[in-house]
Image (tube, rainbow, N blue to C red):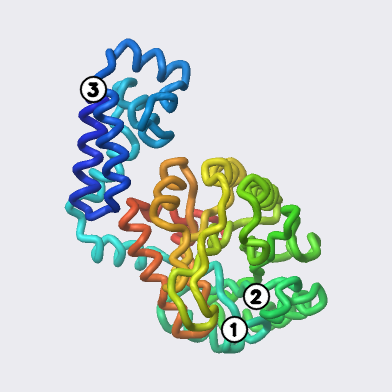
Amino acid sequence: MEPVDALRQIAFLLERAGEPTYRVRAFRGAAKVVEDLPREELEERALAETLTELPGVGKVTALAITEALAGQTPTYLRRLEATSGTDLSEAAARLREALKGDLHSHTTWSDGGSPIEEMAEAARAIGHSYLTITDHSPRLTVARGLSAERLAEQIEVIEGLRERFAPFEIRTGIEVDILADGSLDQDPALLARLDCVVASVHSALKMDAEEMTRRMVAAVANPHVDVLGHCTGRIVQAGGRRGGLRAESRFDAEIVFEACRRFGVAVEINSRPDRLDPPKRLLRLAYEMGCVFAIDSDAHAPGQLDWLVYGCERAALCGVEPERVVNTGIWPLS
């Protein structure tokens, strides 16, 4: 496949899927630039990694050009072709059916509305095999985050409930704050005892992009972290428990997702209707970079546990297969 053909086919499929016009223009614009250049120059630029110096050619389009020059079908195009004509409701349903449990939920121990037992009973009723309790860490005082002492107490409570709920599993966890320097807001010895650690940014969300990138990478590189929670921190639906809208945090997504891939940290697909984080463009980027994902409800009440379908719909739309989702069972504890 010639690069210009690949770029135009990508643009066509994006248009057919009703994707934003700016994304379509990016591929059509790059196709026009490529069409006017000799193949030899394109090959030289691909080898020297200077394709992005061409006007209208960004990192994503440059990768597609490079893969086409190498005789491959570009990853971006393969994903679009794989989902083209797919019934997304069926694809989302298959993905939802494959999920064995939820790695992110809250209880009355922090800012949730129901106790552990009630959340576990609801999770079991909707077909989960397990539920991970991930209440907040101490720095998030507005959410009654758990001090080290309270977390240790919660671990003991959950262990005491396990026999009662077996074979359904209640798993220990935490949604730990990523502090400004990238460290985690909880005792490392306690984090090591937990089944799952979801690390999220909840403060200084308007931090400079370079500093935010360093902050997130430092957290992802921490050996205790299993999941990077709602990576942009955006709020897309006004009202409810979080009040108004919130813009995305700024960071170098390629660097952060590469860190996730390298350190084996799952990128969370947060299913809350007011978050739907990450945005589709970043979800696609994380997929193309080889990341694995955790589709989580971030439930704060029993009925919200069934919000997983929203995350499954977004995952299906972006071509994410069950094999790339850790809570379908590809992790020993997922």
> Which residue: 37% across, 25% down?
66
Q: Quadrant of residue 62?
A: top left
Per the image, the residue denoted by label 2 is 135
Instruction: Give coordinates of residue 256: x percent, y percent.
Output: 58, 46
Q: CA distance from mark 3 to mark 2?
A: 54 Å
Badge 1 marks a residue whose secondary structure is loop
> Which residue: 41% across, 42% down?
288
Per the image, the residue denoted by label 1 is 112
Disc 2 to disc 1: CB gap under 8 Å? yes
Badge 3 marks a residue whose secondary structure is helix
Residue 42 in sight here: yes
Per the image, the residue denoted by label 3 is 35
Q: CA distance from mark 2 to mark 1?
A: 8 Å
Number of the front mark, 3 or 1? 3
Q: Amino acid at mark 2?
A: Asp
How many residues crowd around disc 1 within 10 Å: few (fewer than 14), some, or many (20 or more)? many
> Which residue: 39% across, 24% down?
54
